[in-house]
Amino acid sequence: MNETEERLKEETEKWLEKLNFRIQKRDKSVEQMENVLAYRDDTEHFLEEDDFIRAWESVIYAWGILETLERLDKFNSPIE
């Protein structure tokens, strides 16, 4: 694994961990949460396949959807 791949892997794993923590307390039935969860699952799959670019893209997409839902007040609880 070269330096770029190692860095992508580390950053992806860091943001995946933060994403998993953040979604623990979120209502999974909120519309579009299925996409957040699907991209999260894709991230894990791509990490297993050592496809670090797609893993990074997937975790970023998941974050973007989650943050959009939060900004649109789709959840009944504040961001923690």
Image (spheres, rainbow, N blue to C red):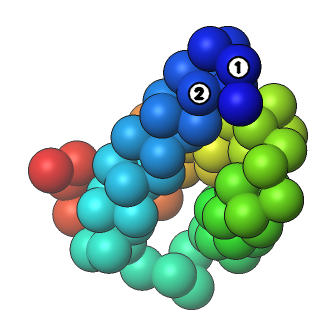
Identified at 64% across, 44% down, the residue is 59
Distance between mark 2 and mark 1 Cα atoms = 6 Å
> Circle 1 sits in a helix, a strand or a loop, which is it?
loop
**Amino acid at dot 1:** Asn
Residue type pointed to by label 2: Glu
Which mark identifies residue 6? 2
SS at mark 2?
Answer: helix
76 or 9, which lies in front? 9
Say whether residue 77 is visible.
yes
Q: Position of residue 54 (x, y in %)?
A: 84, 40
Q: Nearer the viewer, mark 2 or mark 1?
A: 1
How many residues crowd around disc 2 within 10 Å: few (fewer than 14), some, or many (20 or more)? Answer: few
In the rendered view, tell whether residue 32 sits above or below residue 51: below
Q: Which residue lies under the disc numbered 1? A: 2
Q: Quadrant of residue 6?
A: top right
Residue 12 versus residue 69 in the image, above or below: above
In the image, is residue 14 above or below residue 29? Answer: above
Residue occupying the point 70% across, 19% down: 2
Q: Quadrant of the N terminus?
A: top right
Marks 2 & 1, CB-CB < 8 Å contact: yes
Q: Could you say where residue 17 lies in the image, as x and y percent from the top left?
A: 37, 54
- Residue furthest out toward the top: 4
Question: Callout 1: 10 Å neighbours few (<14), some, many (20+)?
Answer: few
Residue at the image point whose x is 34% and y is 49% from the top: 18
Q: Residue furthest left?
A: 80
Q: Please indicate whether residue 39 sits to the left or right of residue 54 in the image.
A: left
Specify the quadrant of the image occupied by residue 41. bottom right
Q: Residue 20: x and y, percent?
A: 40, 64
Q: Can residue 57 be seen? A: no
From the viewer's perspective, tell me whether residue 54 is left or right of residue 2: right
Left or right of 44? Residue 76 is: left
